[in-house]
Image (cartoon, grey):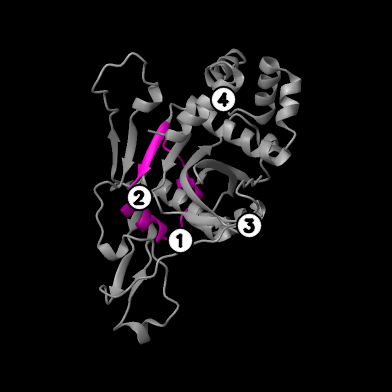
């Protein structure tokens, strides 16, 4: 179950006094724009029409907080509109994907199985701190914008010249029991994905680049992984309530989800996310094991070998596998826990 979505939607419904997403989708359908992405301007128009301009101006008093909130409304609405596709990453497959490089992978492979998905991150995988408070990433909304309805001239104005893939990430974080959010925009031109990641970091003006780099890598590698022939992806049917209760259970609490990597089992020394040793392997071979990072092979297939598919070369350990392996921790050096990257 996507607990964040249920809580966030319930909060919206209470705040506005009606089923927010259902009403917004009705307007979307009436305008004939339900096949397109919802924009901030359209969302603000909807809020004005239903709750008045004064309420919208009240929400905008704290501009930074408002931008974070409105971006999460857009992310969760796209998730709602695209059938609430939820993917649950296992700890082991997450560890392996985090230690996989994106060498020589073309942007053509950077596509979602559905236009919007939610990735549940294993507990304890991404921990950090901000101003003395602990922060943990619980999940990531991933939305791929539909660029097909626009002309090249319109795309140049909207997302930038030469951009052919535009993905938005919505980070869902927990700090002292409360949700905090971050929004990150990834824009790619035709060509190699890895070479363009640094440009995306720079454009985002990241204050917590080490953590964001791993988040970016996990999302991108997950998208690559679920497209491979050997991907371990299983649909889990919603569980039925054991007892019939008077109060109906919200549909989202009983929705099915996709489990990624449940059958992947790796050796205990890789159970924690690993960091590479700075020492020379020649000097530490007897005492330490070291990690050989994974990568993607862009394999030609089909008639005339003109088609391409990705093959995952998994990361593995060499040297003394019984020796200690260091884990990684993060220090988020951004502003107060609210993180807005526009």
Q: Earlier in the sequence, mark 1 or mark 4?
A: 4
User: Relative to 213, does residue 282 appear above or below in the rendering?
Assistant: below
Q: Mark 2 against mark 1, which lies toward the viewer? A: 1
Mark 1 or 3: in front is 3
**Taking 94 as reference, is 9 above or below it?**
above
Region in magenta = 85-113
- Residue located beneath label 1 in the image: 103
Asked if marks 2 and 3 touch (Cβ < 8 Å), the reply is: no
Give the residue pinned by disc 4: 12
Quote the CA–CA distance across marks 3 and 4: 30 Å
Q: Residues within 10 Å of mark 2 (few under 14, many from 20)?
A: few
Q: Quadrant of the N terminus?
A: top left
Q: Mark 3 highlights which residue?
A: 207
Q: Residue at x 51, y 46 (%)?
A: 176
Looking at marks 2 and 1 on the same chain, the residue that comes earlier in the sequence is marked by: 1
**Residue 140: within the magenta?**
no
Mark earlier in primary sequence (3, 4): 4
Corner quadrant of residue 333: bottom right
**Residue tagged by mark 2?**
304
């Amino acid at each position: 179950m996507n607990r964040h979505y249920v809580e966030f939607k319930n909060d919206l419904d209470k705040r506005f006094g009606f089923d927010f997403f259902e009403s917004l989708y009705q307007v979307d359908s009436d305008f004939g724009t339900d096949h397109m992405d919802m924009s901030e301007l359209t969302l603000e128009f909807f809020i004005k029409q239903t709750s008045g301009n004064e309420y919208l101006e009240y929400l905008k008093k704290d501009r930074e907080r408002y931008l974070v909130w409105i971006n999460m409304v857009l992310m969760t609405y796209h998730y709602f509109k695209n059938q609430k596709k939820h993917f649950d990453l296992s700890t082991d497959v997450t560890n392996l994907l985090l230690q996989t490089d994106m060498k020589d992978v073309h942007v053509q492979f950077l596509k979602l199985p559905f236009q919007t998905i939610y990735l549940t991150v294993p507990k304890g995988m991404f921990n950090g701190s901000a101003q003395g408070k602990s922060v943990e990433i619980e999940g990531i909304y991933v939305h791929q914008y539909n660029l097909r309805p626009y002309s090249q001239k319109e795309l140049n104005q909207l997302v930038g010249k030469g951009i052919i893939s535009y993905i938005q990430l919505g980070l869902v974080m927990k700090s002292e029991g409360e949700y905090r959010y971050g929004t990150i925009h990834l824009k790619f031109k035709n060509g190699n994905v890895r070479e363009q990641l640094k440009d995306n970091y720079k454009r985002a003006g990241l204050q917590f680049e080490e953590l964001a780099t791993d988040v970016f890598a996990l999302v991108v590698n997950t998208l690559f992984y679920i497209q491979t022939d050997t991907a371990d992806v299983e649909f889990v049917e919603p569980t039925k309530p054991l007892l019939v209760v008077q109060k109906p259970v919200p549909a989202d609490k009983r929705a099915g989800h996709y489990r990624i990597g449940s059958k992947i089992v790796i050796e205990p020394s890789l159970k924690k996310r690993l960091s590479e040793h700075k020492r020379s392997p020649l000097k530490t071979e007897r005492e330490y094991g070291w990690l050989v990072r994974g990568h993607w092979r862009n394999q030609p297939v089909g008639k005339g070998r003109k088609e391409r598919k990705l093959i995952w070369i998994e990361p593995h350990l060499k040297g003394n596998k019984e020796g200690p392996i260091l884990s990684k921790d993060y220090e988020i050096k951004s502003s107060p826990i609210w993180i807005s990257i526009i």
